[in-house]
Image (tube, rainbow, N blue to C red):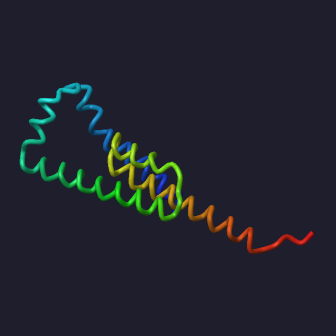
Amino acid sequence: MTRFYLLMCVLGTALPFSSFLPWITTFGFDLPLIWQGISHPLSAFAWLDVVVSALVLFGFIIVEGRRLRMTRLWLPILATCTVGVSLGLPLFLYLRERHLNETINAKSDLSFPSIN
């Protein structure tokens, strides 16, 4: 699954930016134009869906990460804030899967004493 999550990280970054970067190069960071686009009810629906999803993801990252005693929980939160849920979620799942695999490997090393 770790390779799948990494692939989703790449896609989760590349696909949104493939639409966003051409728009930014054309219009720049024109905040009134951005707010104008959000003011349409359909756009507002999509933005609010993303905001709620991001908040849920932050909660999941914090609670699950602390439960598993993971480190670097700031990384998927930063990825969500800079790129979006499309990067933050697969990045957290990758880090979680890797942490679980390392934990399982560490426990199995302890349970089988070496014969010297």
Q: Position of residue 107 (x, y in %)?
A: 68, 69
Q: Position of residue 6 (x, y in %)?
A: 49, 52
* Total numbered labels placed on residues in the image: 0
Q: Position of residue 73 (x, y in %)?
A: 46, 51
Q: Residue at x 46, y 52 (%)?
A: 7
Tell me the quadrant of the picture where the C terminus can be found. Answer: bottom right
Vertical placement of residue 114 versus 35, above or below: below
Q: Residue at x 13, y 53 (%)?
A: 45
Q: Is residue 97 left or right of residue 19?
A: right
Q: State which quadrant residue 53 falls in.
A: bottom left
Depth check, front residue: 21 or 88: 88
Depth check, front residue: 37 or 111: 111
Depth check, front residue: 74 or 24: 74
Q: Is residue 92 left or right of residue 85?
A: right
Q: Residue at x 30, y 59 (%)?
A: 56
Q: Is residue 39 left or right of residue 58?
A: left
Q: Residue furthest right?
A: 116
Q: Is residue 57 left or right of residue 28?
A: right
Q: Position of residue 23 (x, y in %)?
A: 23, 32
Depth check, front residue: 31 or 28: 31
Q: State which quadrant residue 19 falls in.
A: top left
Vertical placement of residue 17 versus 12, above or below: above
Q: Residue at x 8, y 42 (%)?
A: 39
Vertical placement of residue 52 versus 75, above or below: below
